[in-house]
Image (spheres, rainbow, N blue to C red):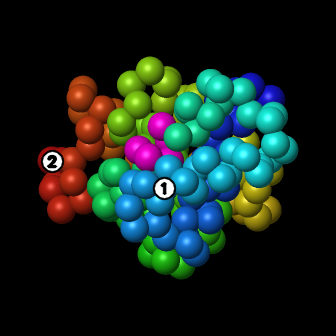
């Protein structure tokens, strides 16, 4: 498994934990991340590049959380965010962050990585669910050259 895949999986685990144990300050988040890398997945097995990318993903998702959630909600007709499985919701957040805010990763890579991780951590239907929503999000995000999709309240037409 490559460093970036491992980082995405680590970020998914951290975001899953934060769903139930929210942090209130940046210092709390930094401590939670440090604790994660001391204890999981196996102490001392995370390469520095993996740790750096994990932190970038987690902090990016948290920093842009409202915009990311609005974009997911816009793309997921008939599904409210709170009804989605926690793994699916956080995997969508990670991939949406990459699609919208990370310019050095090709969109196809972000989509494929999310689908593969969904197969490992999600339910039997997670990969198809993730694929459908991320395909819509990718279309919205990449319709605009700045990689920034319109906010959920804007009409792109």
The residue shown at (39%, 25%) is 103
Q: Nearer the viewer, residue 75 or 91?
A: 91
Up-down: is 109 above or below 32? above
* Quadrant in the picture for residue 110: top right
Give how far across and how far down residue 143 sits, in percent. Answer: 28, 34
> Residue tagged by mark 1?
29
Left or right placement of residue 2 versus residue 67 in this view: right
Magenta segment main secondary structure = helix
Vertical placement of residue 121 versus 85, above or below: above
Q: Secondary structure at mark 1?
A: helix
| Residue nearest the viewer, comparing 151 with 133 | 151
Instruction: Using the rendered view, name the quadrant where residue 97 is placed.
Output: top left
Which residue appears farthest toward the right when viewing the image? Answer: 42
Residue 58 belongs to the span the image colors magenta: yes
Crowd rating for badge 2 (residues with CA inside 10 Å; few <14, some 14–19, many 20+)? few
Between discs 1 and 2, the one toward the N terminus: 1
Q: Is residue 26 above or below residue 21?
A: above
Residue 68 visible from this viewpoint: no
Q: Which numbered marker is on residue 66?
A: none
Q: Residue furthest bottom?
A: 83
Please name the residue shown 49% across and 70% down the image: 22
Residue located farthest toward the top when viewing the structure as drawn: 104
Q: Nearer the viewer, mark 1 or mark 2?
A: 1
| Label 1 CA crowd tier, 10 Å (few <14, some 14–19, many 20+) | some
Name the quadrant containing residue 60.
top left
Label of residue 157 in the image: 2
Q: Which residues are magenta?
A: 56-60
The residue nearer to you, when weighing 50 against 153, is: 50
């Amino acid at each position: 498994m490559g460093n970036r895949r491992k980082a995405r999986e680590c970020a998914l685990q951290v975001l899953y934990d934060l769903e139930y144990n929210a942090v209130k300050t940046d210092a709390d988040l930094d401590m939670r991340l440090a604790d994660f890398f001391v204890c999981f997945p196996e102490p001392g097995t995370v390469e520095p590049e993996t740790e750096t990318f994990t932190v970038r993903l987690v902090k990016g998702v948290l920093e842009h959380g409202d915009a990311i959630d609005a974009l997911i909600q816009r793309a997921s007709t008939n599904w409210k965010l709170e009804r989605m499985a926690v793994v699916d919701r956080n995997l969508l957040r990670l991939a949406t962050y990459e699609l919208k805010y990370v310019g050095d990763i090709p969109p196809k890579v972000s989509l494929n990585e999310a689908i593969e991780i969904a197969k490992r951590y999600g339910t039997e239907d997670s990969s198809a669910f993730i694929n459908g929503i991320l395909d819509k999000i990718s279309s919205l995000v990449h319709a605009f050259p700045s990689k920034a999709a319109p906010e959920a309240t804007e009409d792109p037409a």
